[in-house]
Amino acid sequence: MSSEAILRFENISKNINRTEILKNINFEVEMGEVVGIIGKNGSGKTTLLKLASGLSYPTKGEIYFFDKKLEPGFVGRLPQNIGVLIETPSFISNLSGFDNLYYLSKIKIFLFIIFKKLDICEYLLLANTVVHLLKHT
């Protein structure tokens, strides 16, 4: 495997409700490479993207993002500085997928404040304010 890979799947399998969705998947994506994923409905495309983004975890195998193993959990090692909209995005419906990702990336600064300093009521108020501001920019 190349040392320039930004994403690497090693022997990835994923089961959902006892159904094997992916079996022993191995691939890597190089820096600057553009990759398309095609397949029939139910072939595992969405599952593959969820695994790559840290939104789901493999049943078996390991995933590396910039040579760092992705690990599950809220405080696990997740991919940094990425945005993902899978299937039907619904963050701000009147914006394009690109614009939604752009605005989502701007929210990152609030995460530290939210999880370190605010209680749940303050979080909900701030989240509502941020969404309102983004819809009107």
Image (tube, grey):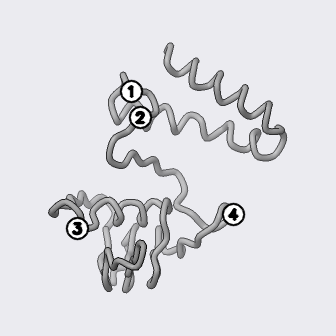
CA–CA distance between discs 2 and 1?
5 Å
Check whether the beta carbons of the residues at disc 1 and disc 3 lie within 8 A of each other. no
* Mark whose residue sits in front, 2 or 4: 2
CA–CA distance between discs 4 and 1?
30 Å
Q: Which residue is mark 2?
A: 90
Check whether the beta carbons of the residues at disc 2 and disc 4 lie within 8 A of each other. no
Where residue 130 appears, as percent x and y from the top left, is 62, 25
Q: Which residue is mark 4?
A: 75
Where residue 60 appears, as percent x and y from the top left, is 45, 84
Could you tell me which residue is drawn at 53 percent across and 71 percent down? 70
* Neighbours of disc 4 within 10 Å: few (<14), some (14-19), many (20+): few
Q: Is residue 47 visible?
A: yes
Check whether the beta carbons of the residues at disc 4 and disc 1 lie within 8 A of each other. no
Task: First in sequence, mark 2 or 4: give its number.
Answer: 4
Q: Which residue is mark 1?
A: 93
Helix or strand or loop: what does disc 4 sit on?
loop
* Observer-nearest of 43 and 68: 43
Helix or strand or loop: what does disc 3 sit on?
loop
Could you tell me which residue is drawn at 39 percent across and 77 percent down? 14
* Mark whose residue sits in front, 4 or 1: 1
Q: Which mark is residue 43?
A: 3
Taking 135 as reference, is 71 left or right?
right
Where residue 127 appears, as percent x and y from the top left, is 65, 30
Task: First in sequence, mark 4 or 1: give its number.
Answer: 4
CA–CA distance between discs 1 and 3?
27 Å
Question: Can you say whether 2 is above or below 41 in the image?
Answer: below
